[in-house]
Amino acid sequence: MKITGVERAMHIYGNQNKVNKVEPKKTPESDQFKISEHAKDFQSVLRSLRDVPDVRRDKVEALKNQVAAGTYKVDAKKVADSMIRQANISRP
């Protein structure tokens, strides 16, 4: 019996003992982001607006006092002009 190809098999098995050098993986750079100047300005304005109260309490108190005292007067012309402006209607 004749066995052929043994040299090739021995060559393959012989290569298993060799250690392949593996380069250490470089640590990937971390993700970064940059906020634009416009966004920083916007953020600053939002912070400022949070500090402003939604209701002008001094004006509300003054109006309450006028209504309670019966001295609050409504200017019908101003109300009508405001309604027209808000409705975008032209007035002659």
Image (cartoon, grey):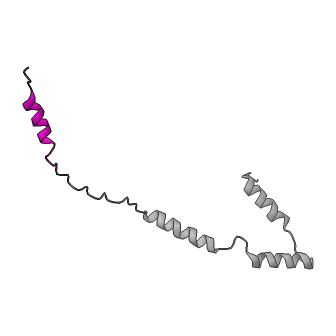
Judge whether 26 appears above or below 16 on screen: below
The answer to whether 73 appears left or right of 32 in the picture is right
The answer to whether 3 appears left or right of 45 in the picture is left
Could you say which quadrant of the image residue 48 lies in? bottom right
Residue 11 placement (x, y as % from top left): 9, 36
Say which residue appears at 83% left-offset and 75% top-offset: 63
The answer to whether 67 appears left or right of 24 in the picture is right
Foreground: 22 or 49? 22
Could you say which quadrant of the image residue 69 lies in? bottom right
Judge whether 80 appears above or below 57 on screen: above
Q: Looking at this view, name the residue that lies furthest to the right.
A: 70
Foreground: 19 or 70? 19
Q: Which residues are magenta?
A: 4-21
Judge whether 11 appears above or below 35 on screen: above
Judge whether 3 appears above or below 30 on screen: above
Foreground: 57 or 20? 20
Could you say which quadrant of the image residue 67 lies in? bottom right
Say which residue appears at 70% left-offset and 70% top-offset: 54
* Residue 60 is covered by the magenta coloring: no
